[in-house]
Amino acid sequence: MNQVDLHCHTTASDGALSPAELVARGAALGLRVIAITDHDSADGVTEALAAGAKCGVTVISGVEINSDVPGSEVHVLGYFVDHTDSALNESLLRLRDGRVGRARRMAELLTEMGAPVCFERILELAGNGAVCRPHVALAIVEAGHTATIEDAFARYIGRNGPAYVERLRLTPEEACGLIRRAGGLPVLAHPVYFDRTGMMKTAFDLEHGLAQLKAAGLAGIEVYYPGYDVMAIEYLLGQARRHGLLVTGGTDFHGMRANEPDLGGVYVPIKAARRLRAAWEGQKQATGARELGTVMRD
């Protein structure tokens, strides 16, 4: 049985469950380690840590930062970040503010092309969390323009869609630096994807790009992820070995998308969580940073 999920989203960004609800669900499913990795936000971490203490689940304080490369985007996960760090939270707030302006422009474009959605409804769907494209997609579905969130992305707001809007982004190197300065470990999220023909693709050249990111502070690479087959996993394990990177994984759980795996639905070896924590402990000893979160349970 899987005991680890290192990639989870809550209502602090675009997840369906509150931090406490997510942790409680993880406990009910037998998970022992959960990382809260909301988009451009660490606002759900405090609540999740408290819930983890009650449920007997180890909660790792984390974040997922969207960054930009030419022609695509790269997501960087941050583990064991100090979620109270003022510099981190100020930077994340600027990124979230950029999301609001982006959502407003998307609503304007959708209206201009004959698929009107209400900007205020997008904000309502986001609640107190970061405004993300899935909230725009939900508004599109509610307005009757598509049947599913996936269709909304494919027809309107995917990266090459007619209502797609760029927003404020960091480079992957800047994201790694921000996470490191907040005491965390940066990990490259879902490094590969599959196109419509089933061909494995990457947002940038991993063979050379990983060395550059490691020089900027990258500590690991996400290997276990929904839809990754044996070939993809072996390829990424080889990249991790070649560049001396940690291995992580998770479901990218949101709880609001059709056909997504349930929390803990992707196998992640418990040793991956232990090695991640050991690396963070080593970083703490080297930097003198204070400990955050709970103690890893055997």
Image (cartoon, rainbow, N blue to C red):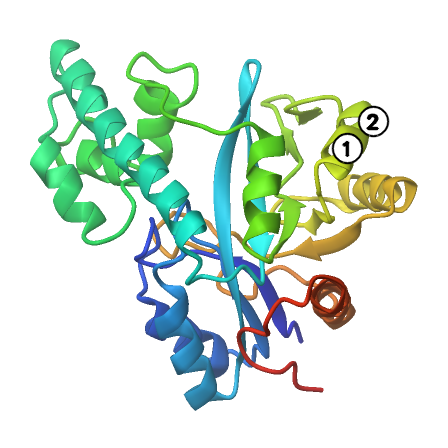
Q: Residue at (11%, 22%) from the top-left corner? A: 116
Query: Could you say which is closer to the camera, residue 183 or residue 263?
Result: 183
Q: Position of residue 156 (x, y in %)?
A: 31, 20
Residue 261 visible somewhere in the drawing: no
Q: Which numbered mark, 2 or 1, is in the foreground of this view?
A: 1
Vertically, is 112 above or below 145?
above
Q: Is 40 on the left or on the right of 17, as rendered?
A: right
Q: Are marks 2 and 1 in contact (CB under 8 Å)?
A: yes
Q: Residue at (30%, 30%) from the top-left corner? A: 98
The disc placed on residue 65 is none
Q: Residue at (81%, 32%) from the top-left corner? A: 211
Name the kind of residue labelled 1 in the image.
Leu
Residue 162 visible somewhere in the drawing: yes
Choose top left, top right, bottom left or bottom right for residue 154. top left
Quadrant assignment for the N terminus: bottom right
Quadrant assignment for the C terminus: bottom right
Name the kind of residue labelled 2 in the image.
Glu
The residue singled out by tag 2 in the image is 207
Q: Position of residue 105 (x, y in %)?
A: 20, 20
